[in-house]
Amino acid sequence: MTWTFTPDLAAWAAAVRPAVAARPVPHTQLVTVIDALERQGLDAFGSEPPLFGWWTGPDGLVAGALVQCPPHPLLIGTLPAEAVRELGAALASEPVLAGVDALNARREDARALAVSWGKPTEVVEENRLYRLAGLIAPDPAPAGRARPAEEADLPLLLEWVTAFRQESGEGGAASEAALRDRLSYGGMLLWEDAGTPVSLAGFFRPIDAVTRIGPVYTPPELRGRGYAAGVTYAATEAAHAAGAAEVLLFTDLANPTSNRVYQRLGYTPVEDRVEVALA
């Protein structure tokens, strides 16, 4: 039983893909990270090179995966208990992990790893993963309609996705390359009221019939009118039309409004993930 760490994307993807694909719902973030890195290159998430890792169980099979794309936290997939214990020890002693200052893991794993880290930590974000059980139209329906975003909408998309990143704590600016990729498969939608864009929602490229909604953003002055529910409903329909049989999304547990909205649309909780950072 051991962790292997490497800067080699091809080696990592080959090693972890079967385990990740076997459980695509809890591994949804890893699936989209692999896709982005393979499509856009190692600088898809930042200028610093990523760090990859996988855990091999006693049967010789890979049963756990992680990736860090600086400046983002160490993203940790679903792990067996033994892998969590060994990763905790590695965080405290493995030189290649010395630069890790934050991690994103399932709630119980994050708690155990924070203890093993041996350094003061704090919880900076708590998110809940939802999966669609059955799509329910917003009631009452908001004014307006959805339409696919187009090339001419790119300046607005850049502005709003950057605002979303700042508001959500993710930070940084929206990636034009990533948005152009979304536009190529119809993965960004705008909700218009009286012909004016008032909200947006996107979905990731479906992989093995699984996708994830995000981002969803409405400018502050336009909130409270049901636009986010309308555009999320439309994005979910578009994701199904693009080939997704399973549609997921994350919500910030600090935002009870969005959690209620998505549950009214038919999304049900799967698990909670926590971001822990060095204090």
Image: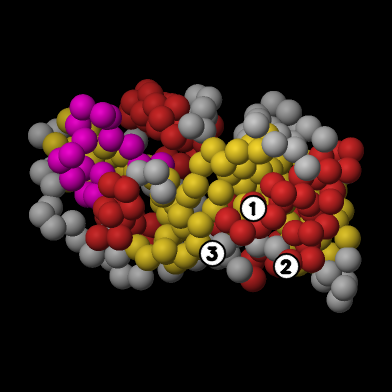
Q: Label 2: how many residues lie within 10 Å, few (<14), some (14-19) or many (20+)?
A: few
Residue at coordinates 47% horizontally, 65% vertically from top-left? 270
Gap in Å between the C-alphas at discs 3 and 1?
A: 21 Å
Residue sitting nearer the eye, 32 or 133: 133
The total of numbered circles placed on residues is 3
- Res. 140 mark: none
Q: Position of residue 96 (x, y in %)?
A: 86, 39
Residue 64 within the segment the image draws in magenta: no
- Label 3: which secondary element: loop
Which numbered disc, 2 or 1, marks the residue closer to the eye? Answer: 1
Amino acid, disc 2:
Pro
* Quadrant in which the C terminus is drawn: top right
- Label 1: which secondary element: helix
What residue range appears in magenta?
214-230
Q: Label 3: how many residues lie within 10 Å, few (<14), some (14-19) or many (20+)?
A: many
Gap in Å between the C-alphas at discs 2 and 1?
A: 15 Å
Position of 71 compared to 159: left or right?
Answer: right
Position of 230 compared to 160: left or right?
Answer: left
Q: Find disc 1 in the rendering and name its residue.
A: 111
Residue 37 in which image quadrant: top right
Position of 224 compared to 35: left or right?
Answer: left
Residue 197 in which image quadrant: top left
Which numbered disc, 3 or 1, marks the residue closer to the eye? Answer: 1
Amino acid, disc 3:
Val
